[in-house]
Image (cartoon, helix red, strand yellow):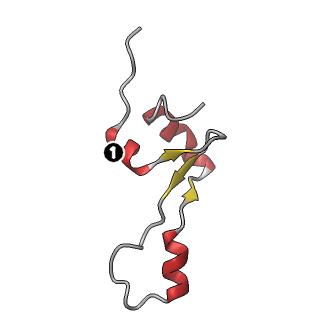
Amino acid sequence: MPKLKSHRGAAKRFKSTASGRFKRRRACGSHILTKKTTKRKRKLDTPTLIDHADHKAVQHMLPYGSK
């Protein structure tokens, strides 16, 4: 059976953790930053894990990205 291709858009947005979950960036952290507080901008800068409901879809797009 041939190798599966990764979804290139998903590969740029999600990274796999050692436990097989996926990290993502938070939304709203790239523009209109003047009205956002320093605390809010700092929180937006930290990565978070994707929701459990989206795990199957991301795993399908990135067949070699997780265990």
Q: 10 above or below 66?
A: below
Name the residue nearer the viewer: 7 or 39: 39
- Report the side of 40 relative to 4 (left or right): right
Viewer-side residue, 38 vs 57? 38
Q: Is disc 1 surrounded by few (<14), some (14 to 19) or many (20+) residues within 10 Å? A: few
Q: Position of residue 19 (x, y in %)?
A: 66, 40
Q: Is residue 41 above or below residue 25?
A: below
Count of marks placed on residues: 1
For image coordinates 54% across by 52% down, the residue present is 23
Give the farthest residue toward the front: 18
Q: Which residue is mark 1?
A: 9
Residue at x 41%, y 8% (from the top left corner):
1
Farthest right residue in view:
19
Q: Position of residue 2 (x, y in %)?
A: 37, 12
Q: Tag 1's secondary structure?
A: helix
* Above-or-below relation of 23 to 42: above
Q: Residue farthest to the top? A: 1
Q: Quadrant of the C terminus?
A: top right
Query: What is the three-letter code of the residue carrying label 1?
Result: Gly
Q: Residue at x 54, y 67 (%)?
A: 46
Query: Residue visible at 47% across and 29% down?
Result: 63
Q: Position of residue 37 (x, y in %)?
A: 49, 89
